[in-house]
Amino acid sequence: MDSQPQSPLAVGSHVFKSRLIFGSGGMRSIAALRIALANTQSELTTVAMRRYDPAASGRLFDVLREFNQQILPNTAGCYNATEAVITAELAREALETNLIKVEVINDDSTLLPDPIETLKATEVLTNKGFEVMAYISDDVVLARRIEQAGAKAVMPLGAPIGSGMGILNPFNIETIVNFANVPIILDAGLGSASDAALAMELGCDGVLAASAINRAEDPAIMAEAFRLGVIAGHLSRRAGRIPKSTRAIASTAISGKAQFEVSSNN
Amino acid sequence: MQITLNGKSASVVDGVKLGEVIDMFAVDRRGVAVALNGEVVKRGDWDSQVLIDRDAIEILSIAAGG
């Protein structure tokens, strides 16, 4: 086995030692963010672009720099490709990164990603030199189309944002993985570390967790749990699980077992 | 003249440069991006961009977001 418990994650021109991407959404405080970054050991953290807030903007930026985070800006809150493209351009200008997590939702009730606008934004931003990580539903064909549009990573949801329901359609996630030529990052809907481990066992290349950590009763411990869950799932996938069988298969050899005379009275 | 700065009306002197408005509004320029009338203005152009009456400026920075 490699000396490193997990191999690096490569997204476009970027390489990350950790396969856990930390989402800063929903964090309770800057102090909580510091602990989460320390405990997840993530190297990539998502942020949103919002109107400048003199009380908050600089502190978040400083903490992310202190923990050597590569910043992954997103287009959260955008409802169409046009909004997403200008938000991405502003993020590139602010952060001097060509990475962008494209997130275009269709309504503020389900928060489900809009497949058509996401595809459009992915095409336009790829042509503008961005390295796009696209948040999508767990649709197998859409994942393929997003990859063909130039995305450097495809990020299917496990369940709706913040729902904590885990991976509702493991078959689709596994099928997306089997057809993909770019990293698949499970994004949204996870609730616990076992969900992260399952994502990795299904073959995902990484996991993004925000609400599951930031809204946990104890975010510091959940951050550590997610770190370990991602590593465990990654190793489990690499190790190769035993096939599932509808019959029991004895693990102990029968040969060599002693024979005993048993009285019928017993 | 009047401009709109992050959705609010503001009075500024005629001929003011975009960079001057940014420095009045933001503590520092790190991690900041600016749109003028819906178009991104590159950092290198902030100090030469002259504003005109009714310009709409959005000054953005990072915020927590998943």
Image (cartoon, rainbow, N blue to C red):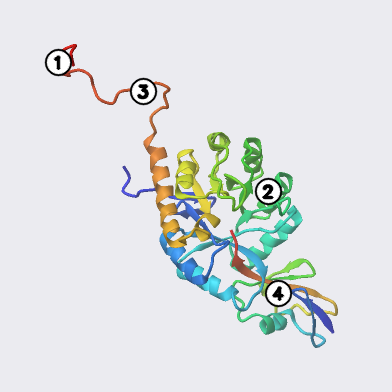
- The residues tagged by marks 1 and 2 sit, at their Cα atoms, a distance apart of 66 Å
Nearest the viewer among A260 and A103 is A260
| Amino acid type assigned to the residue bearing label 1 in the image | Phe
Q: Are marks 1 and 2 in contact (CB under 8 Å)?
A: no
- SS under mark 1: loop
Q: Which residue is mark 3?
A: A248
If you read the primary sequence from the N terminus, does the residue marked by circle 3 or circle 2 appear first?
2
Q: Are marks 3 and 4 on the same chain?
A: no
**Side (left or right) of B21 relative to A35:** right
Disc 3 versus disc 4: nearer the observer: 3
For mark 3, give the secondary structure.
loop
Residue B45 tag number? 4
Q: Residue at x 60, y 78 (%)?
A: A55
The residues tagged by marks 3 and 4 sit, at their Cα atoms, a distance apart of: 71 Å
Snapshot quadrant of residue B66? bottom right
Tag 2 secondary structure: loop
Say which residue label 1 marks.
Answer: A260
User: Residue A113, labelled with which disc?
Assistant: 2
Q: Chain of mark 4?
A: B
Asked if residue A90 is positioned above or below residue A227 in the image, the reply reads below
Give the spatial CA distance, label 1 vs label 4: 93 Å
Residue, far front: A265
